[in-house]
Amino acid sequence: MRPSAPGPRVIVLRCKACRTELPAASNDVAFRCPQCGRAWEIETGGLIERPSYFVAAPSGKRQPILYLPYWSFTIEAEVKAAFLAEGDELGARDKAARYKRGWVAAYSIHRPTYVGEWGAAYTRINPKWEVRSGHGPQAPGATISGVDGQSIVGHYVLGDIDRKADIGDLDLDLEVGDPELWAIPCYDLGEVIRCPWTRGELPAACLDDLSEIRRALERREA
Ligand SMILES: [Zn+2]
């Protein structure tokens, strides 16, 4: 259902659970219902439900919070056998076993390889988050599909293990779970957004639709 030619797409999407209108910008393919918090992705033939979670905002700091969408997946990585020096093999095994879950930013970022992608960092450090489901924060729609996120997160894990050992020589089993749509908070500081956990910053200009996102969220909170 992605438009084949540029131009506005006029479809009204409603949450299949509570019938609330879903906040759909023209490039969005998945949404968190602003009313009940359930997640829906556009698939051929309609909306399919995805598991929906959000991360509790960090307490203490009085800074404006912006929730952004991420795809999240369970990860099982196991190094079976290798033709490597023993040290390398153990390093790769340990590293593979550490992965439990991965994340991919579901919003559009300009030049992500240059400015960084926080999903990759979260996949590496696996933050201790307070994770919740149900009614919760407002978040913009996802512009990349869950299936695309699934293949990207696989590359994050492989790329990271590859730094420990040449994966060409490894027999690696990688299982990535089904897409879950997560809303994860960051600080909206105007010129930049800042990650509360890594302290990483992204220039606001790197987020494709940030002004549109801010306007939409303000409208709904008003
Ligand atoms: Zn709903």
Image (cartoon, helix red, strand yellow):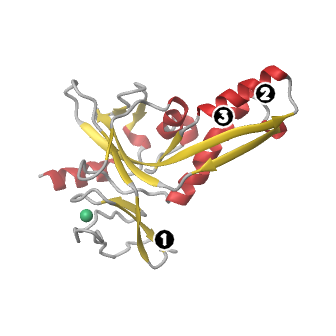
Mark 3 touching mark 2, by CB under 8 A? no
Q: Looking at the picture, how far across and down is residue 144, in whole percent?
A: 49, 57
Residue annotated with mark 1: 2
Q: Looking at the picture, does residue 32 appear above or below residue 68?
A: below
User: What residue is at 25 percent from the left and 51 percent from the top?
Assistant: 138
Q: Are marks 2 and 1 in contact (CB under 8 Å)?
A: no
- The residue mark sitting in front, 3 or 1, is 3
Q: CA distance from mark 3 to mark 2?
A: 11 Å
Q: Are marks 3 and 1 in contact (CB under 8 Å)?
A: no
In terms of sequence position, does the residue under pointer 3 or pointer 1 come before the other?
Answer: 1
Crowdedness of circle 3 by 10 Å Cα count: few (<14), some, many (20+)?
many
Q: CA distance from mark 3 to mark 1?
A: 35 Å
Residue that label 3 marks: 96
Q: CA distance from mark 2 to mark 1?
A: 43 Å
**Residue occupied by mark 2:** 89
Label located before the other in sequence (2 or 1): 1
